[in-house]
Image (cartoon, rainbow, N blue to C red):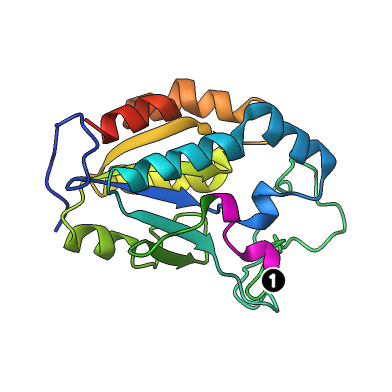
Amino acid sequence: MPPRIDLDPSLAKDRAALVLFDTLNGYLHPTDPAKAENLAKWGILENMSRLVKGAHEAGLIAFYGAADHAADGADVASRLTDTDMDLNPWGERERRFMPAHRHGQESAEIAPEVAPQDGDVMVPKHRWSAFHQTHLDLQLRVRGLSTIVIAGGSTDVGIASTVFAARDLDYGIVVVRDCCYSHRGDNNAFFMERVFPRMGRVMTTDEAIALMTT
């Protein structure tokens, strides 16, 4: 059964949970200089660290939706798409989205700046949505948690997929806009301004923490 419909705007620990999406070393400490520069410019790590600290201090449980792809890529499906992730035509290349960070690699571990603490829950995932064939929905429901506060990246991939799933499962949704990012053009702004406000609430790190501590 779906979680209870809860219109209380607060983010108290008895109703809300923090969901961190792919907060992995490989994404938050990228080797690509342009991506590293973007994250620093946007203050992503600093904001995420404050968000996790604020959530923990308020007693919220953090759920870590983390890619757990097989080391040999066996769990990756080939897909007929027009382009790759950066909108480049495939040409003669194999049409396969091979994950850059796989099980057993240091790059696939949670970044230390947002490390889990006792009581937090790891949610291994194999597709974009943190709800798809994972135990996230069950772990939230058994605790009576009806709202998710979501952060991570990429906004136009895993965040969007997870938010759409949460909406269809009748969860309340808070997207922390300055803790989410996309390196692909204006995709982040598009979702924050045109899509997510119709599905939940979009707010800053400071605004989310203030609602956690009320």
| Camera-side residue of 153 and 160 | 153
| Camera-side residue of 102 and 205 | 205
Q: Residue furthest front?
A: 57
Please, what secondary structure does the residue beneath circle 1 have? loop
The quadrant in which the C terminus is found is top left
Q: Magenta segment: does it hold 206?
A: no
Q: Looking at the picture, does residue 154 appear above or below residue 177?
A: below
The spot of residue 144 in percent (x, y) is 15, 55
The quadrant in which the N terminus is found is bottom left
Q: Residue at x 26, y 34 (%)?
A: 213
Q: Quadrant of residue 204?
A: top left
Horizontal arrangement in the rendering, residue 91 relative to residue 110 (left or right): right
Residue stretch in magenta: 105-113
Q: Residue furthest right?
A: 92
Q: Looking at the picture, does residue 80 appear above or below residue 89?
A: below
Horizontal arrangement in the rendering, residue 98 relative to residue 181 (left or right): right
Q: Residues within 10 Å of mark 1 (few under 14, many from 20)?
A: few
The spot of residue 27 in percent (x, y) is 66, 50
Q: Residue at x 54, y 24 (%)?
A: 190
Residue 168, visible in the rendered structure: yes
Q: Looking at the picture, does residue 42 appear above or below residue 2?
A: above
| Camera-side residue of 87 and 150 | 150
Q: Which residue is mark 1?
A: 105
Q: Residue at x 52, y 48 (%)?
A: 158
The spot of residue 98 in percent (x, y) is 71, 64
Q: Amino acid at mark 1?
A: Gln
Q: Quadrant of residue 201?
A: top left
